[in-house]
Image (tube, rainbow, N blue to C red):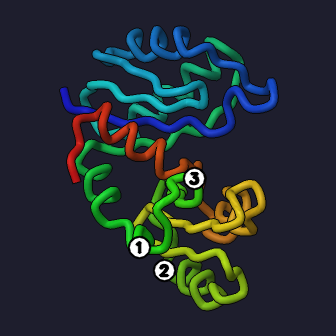
Amino acid sequence: MDTRLLLLRGINVGGHNRVPMADLRALLASLGCEDVVTYVQSGNVVCRADGAPEALGAELRAALSTELGLTVPVVGRTADQWAVMVAGNPLLHLDDDPKRLHVTFLDEEPEPERVAALLSEAEAFAPEVLAVSGRDVYLHTPNGYHQARLSNTFLERRLARVATARNWRTVLALADLAGVTA
């Protein structure tokens, strides 16, 4: 079994898609996961499991639908992928406030043409800055994420991928829980 990180999109936000973390941990245990740990109430999971994180995410999506009647996108990563993402953040030099640095995690790598189109108009989003690396979109949002034009929904539409975003503090906390060093 290897360490997996799972990110659920849109749970426990504004009273919608309520998933108690104890229920989420139990559901993952029923799927064969071990050492299941959740971080805060917004759907961040570190566990040990066999198989690809994408397959585990699909199993969890199906279980959430069957058991709780919820349609919740899930994005998964291995601990090694998480370590590469943390070490590769090209925007760390822009800000030392982890609430203004974010990563939007995509379920699959977007089409190169879509990435090129997004990057070609990057100046229009100033003062926000973005960088794309594979399935990860790094963001610097100096006015805060809630004010950001480069929102999760915007990036999903532009890149045609399922996405979920986390601030840098959460990214680092999950790295710590997963035993990842960058």
User: Can you tell which mark lies on residue 112?
Assistant: 2
11 vs 96: above or below:
above
Considering depth in this image, is 115 or 13 the residue closer to the camera?
A: 13
129 vs 101: above or below:
below
Quote the CA–CA distance across marks 2 and 1.
26 Å
Place residue 178 in its image quadrant: top left
Quarter the N terminus occupies: top left
Label 3 or label 1, whichever comes before in sequence order:
1
Q: Amino acid at mark 2?
A: Pro
Considering depth in this image, is 61 or 148 the residue closer to the camera?
A: 148
Image coords of residue 84 (percent x, y) = 27, 58
Which residue is under mark 3?
99
Q: Which residue lies at the image location 62% right of the left edge and 12% below the top edge?
A: 67
Quarter the C terminus occupies: bottom left
Identify the element where label 2 is drawn. Answer: helix
User: Can you tell which mark lies on residue 169?
Assistant: none
Label 2 or label 1, whichever comes before in sequence order:
1
**Crowd band around label 2 with a 10 angstrom C-alpha radius: few (<14), some (14–19), many (20+):** few
Q: Which residue lies at the image location 62% right of the left edge and 81% below the top edge?
A: 118
Identify the element where label 1 is drawn. Answer: helix
